[in-house]
Amino acid sequence: MFNKFFGRFSKDLGIDLGTSNTLVYSKDGGIVVNEPSIVAINIRTNQILAVGKDAKDMLGKNPPHIEMTKPLTKGVISDFEVTEKMLKYFIDRVHSESFTIVPRPRIVIGVPLETTEVERKAIEDAALSAGARQVFLVENPMLAALGARLPLSESVGMMIVDLGGGTTEIAVMSLAGIVTWKSLPIAGDELNKNIIQYARDVFNLLLGERVAEKVKMRIGTAIEQDEPLEMEMRGRDLLTGLPKEIIVNDTQIREALERSIRTIVDSIKAVLETTPPELVADIYERGIVLTGGGALLRGLDKLISRQAAIPVRIADDPLTSVVRGAGFLLDQEDLLKDISLPSATEGNIL
């Protein structure tokens, strides 16, 4: 009863609970939170010191008593307590300017394709403990398709490749359901690791994660560029132990990323091979849609199009496709009931 009462004064939310970033969509405010999924904890006092951008600024610079935690691994909760606190922090932040004393929103959350019932229950429980009165879980590619404004309920085949931080999810959909799919543990975080490993092997240079990500974003490419790109890369020399700066170019970074990108392209082709021919014909006509932060890697769309012989386009603002899809569902009760996964928590009712 109290949940219903407080729910009237709460803002329903769509949440993209990602490995790298958490985004929150409010019905009346659009995307109100876009923060890294990182929490800084003082292990002496067990207090949360910072969440999101503030915590990311501390990454790699923290003393031993401050622990940097990424509570989600490959889109799945690896630290329940920290995830719950992070969600509560974001929910309270969205409601900070309203008159709600105890926020009790309805929440739509995106989950990876390969989640088990136990993992889904952990996400539901974390959201309910953080203050939600009702939680709906929907598979990320479905939300990405809605966010990219694809006609999810129609009887046409469409293919989404959602390149996130922890996972790359490839799905062929029709009639508001997923027909064939594949989930890979190779995504943005793995590409950062590729750059770190390449710097160590080729230049004897130890890089931090933030530096590797910056290099990937600024000069990372999937195909050869018309104009060469280069930037400085700073880290610690493994031979002398002293700081070192080198200049790297896009050819070297492309070499570092090559194996992971080839795996993603091969997986897309493998999903197409198991897709019914009627749907493949639709996909050939409509093209493959790329969403997620990885879609912004220069030339990736052209490489996939070249290898799969199918047109490829990048969704408008691919970073926010999933959360915009979750926000769209807040007003679509019937569609939400159709595509949400069965609740793993008995108490998750109105």
Image (spheres, rainbow, N blue to C red):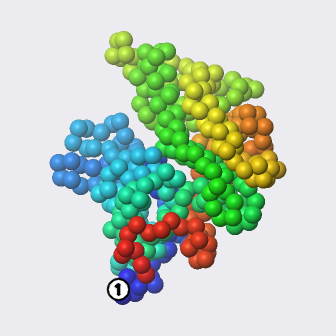
Assign the N terminus to one quadrant of the image: bottom left
Residue 323: x and y, percent? Answer: 56, 60
Residue 88 percent location from the top left of the image: 36, 65
Front-lying residue, 310 or 274: 274
Q: Kindly state the secondary structure of the residue where label 1 is placed.
A: helix
Label 1: few (<14), some or many (≥20) within 10 Å? few
Could you say which quadrant of the image residue 29 lies in? bottom right
Quadrant of residue 64 within the rendered picture: top left
Where is mark 1, residue-wise? Answer: 2
Residue 143: image location, x then y, percent: 59, 60
Identity of the residue drawn at 75% across and 26% down: 226
Q: Nearer the viewer, residue 230 or 303?
A: 303
- Say which of 307 and 101 sits in front: 307
Give the quarter of the figure containing the C terminus: bottom left
- Residue 59 location (% of width, % of height): 37, 40
Please state which amino acid type lies under the numbered disc 1: Phe
* Left/right of residue 315 with respect to residue 64 in the rendered view: right
> Among all residues in the image, which is located at the extreme left?
44
Which residue is at 49% across, 15% downward? 202
Camera-side residue: 142 or 295?
A: 142
Left or right: 93 as drawn, with respect to 151: left
- Position of residue 59 relative to residue 171, above or below, is above
- Residue shown at 50% from the left, 74% from the top: 12
Q: Residue at x 62, y 38 (%)?
A: 267
Furthest-right residue in this view: 285
Along the horizontal axis of the image, is 60 left or right of 226? left
Q: Is residue 244 visible?
A: no
